[in-house]
Image (cartoon, rainbow, N blue to C red):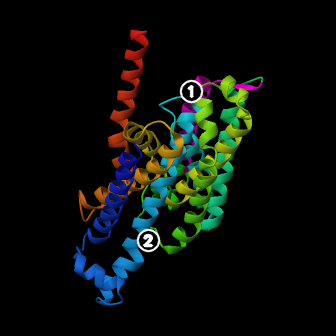
């Protein structure tokens, strides 16, 4: 079993490297692999160097980092809530973060101000959903999911209204609501990468505790797990990772829904193995989605949120149908 999982991890890592190389080389201006190697070795012509080092490389890295972060958050939320349909997008955290980002755009704040606003409104969304779902010392998972969907719809309506009232910032707000990496530079990579990596690691520390929670909260508590503390830490840390991802890429839905499920089918439900595999798989998925967004209708670029929704929408319906069939079979 360990050898088999090792093969899966090596294969996934090689696939990630291949996808990133493909992402760097493809675009309106196709750059051969040999030219890319020359650029990394310090050669290549100036135009190609600018395209690769200042445009495509930071974009490929950012899409991989964001995909990794959203997948890790989705994996933990599904385990924590014991609900296969839970991810940052469905629970409303992404929409909450985008709401803060929209306010920051209208106020003319810089990238760090935008990230701060996204994080604050994301935390407010988490607190609101958590408060509604809580009964005494327990949290209703069904109520949390429904509250997340409701707050997501409400935030989307507010964002749409602000778009109508602020024509000058319309295009930038559209970017956040549809998602994309077209404006990514090394500054985005520099501030988002540490936050997402550290946040993902903090959540990973609680992998064993989440495994215990999956067997039932009472069982987990008998094993010495402080379930309420684990929930709070993962919700807050997950909101930080999600807010950071949204602040650089806009609303990119369903990544945290699709990737954990596929990864779980491959390596099993143990979060100690599942989380790192989901991280690599999420990086592959979003990097490939960004590649498709750039090349399908080139030179025009499709918002990446459209690509992920094209995969995620049908997959969400599949989960609903599967859940219904399981209920009818009981």
Camera-side residue of 118 and 12: 12
In the depicted structure, whether residue 231 falls above or below residue 50: above
Report whether 324 appears left or right of 242: left
Main SS of the magenta segment? helix
Taking the view exactly as shown, the residue that stands out farthest to the right is 136
- The location of residue 120, given as percent across then percent down, is 69, 51
Camera-side residue of 24 and 304: 24
- The location of residue 123, given as percent across then percent down, is 68, 46
In the depicted structure, whether residue 59 falls above or below residue 319: below
| Circle number at residue 58 | 2
Nearer the observer, disc 2 or disc 1? Answer: 2
What residue would you read off at disc 1?
146
Q: Secondary structure at mark 2?
A: helix
Report whether 13 appears left or right of 246: left
Mark 1 Cα within 10 Å, few/some/many (few <14, many 20+)?
some
**Of the image marks 2 and 1, the number of the one nearer the N terminus:** 2
Q: Quadrant of residue 46?
A: bottom left
Span shown in magenta: 137-162
| Residue 109 seen from this side | no
Q: Quadrant of residue 314?
A: top left
In the depicted structure, whether residue 229 falls above or below residue 16: above
- The location of residue 50, given as percent across then percent down, is 36, 83
147 magenta-colored: yes
Q: Quadrant of residue 115?
A: bottom right
Report whether 278 appears left or right of 153: left
């Amino acid at each position: 079993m360990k050898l088999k999982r090792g093969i899966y991890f090596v294969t996934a890592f090689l696939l990630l490297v291949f996808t990133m190389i493909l992402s760097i080389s493809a675009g309106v201006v196709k750059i051969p692999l040999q030219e890319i190697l020359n650029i990394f070795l310090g050669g290549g012509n100036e135009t190609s160097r600018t395209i690769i080092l200042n445009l495509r490389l930071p974009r490929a890295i950012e899409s991989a980092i964001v995909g990794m972060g959203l997948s890790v958050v989705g994996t933990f939320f599904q385990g924590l809530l014991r609900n296969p349909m839970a991810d940052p997008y469905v629970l409303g955290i992404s929409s909450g973060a985008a709401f803060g980002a929209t306010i920051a755009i209208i106020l003319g704040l810089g990238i760090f101000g935008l990230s701060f606003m996204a994080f604050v409104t994301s935390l407010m969304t988490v607190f609101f959903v958590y408060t509604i779902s809580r009964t005494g010392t327990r949290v209703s998972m069904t109520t949390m999911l429904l509250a997340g969907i409701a707050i997501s719809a409400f935030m989307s309506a507010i964002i749409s209204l602000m778009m109508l009232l602020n024509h000058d910032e319309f295009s930038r707000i559209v970017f956040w609501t549809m998602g994309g990496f077209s404006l990514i530079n090394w500054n985005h990579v520099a501030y988002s990468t540490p936050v997402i990596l550290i946040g993902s690691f903090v959540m990973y520390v609680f992998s064993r505790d989440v495994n215990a929670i999956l067997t039932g909260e009472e069982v987990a508590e008998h094993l010495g797990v402080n379930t309420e503390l684990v929930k709070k830490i993962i919700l807050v840390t997950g909101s930080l990772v999600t807010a950071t991802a949204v602040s650089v890429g806009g609303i990119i839905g369903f990544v945290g829904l699709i990737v954990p499920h596929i990864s779980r089918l491959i390596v099993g439900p143990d979060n100690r193995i599942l989380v790192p595999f989901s991280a690599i798989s999420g990086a592959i998925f979003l990097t490939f989605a960004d590649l498709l967004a750039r090349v399908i209708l080139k030179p025009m670029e499709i918002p990446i949120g459209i690509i992920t929704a094209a995969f995620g929408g049908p997959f969400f319906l599949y989960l609903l149908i599967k859940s219904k069939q399981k209920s009818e079979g009981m």
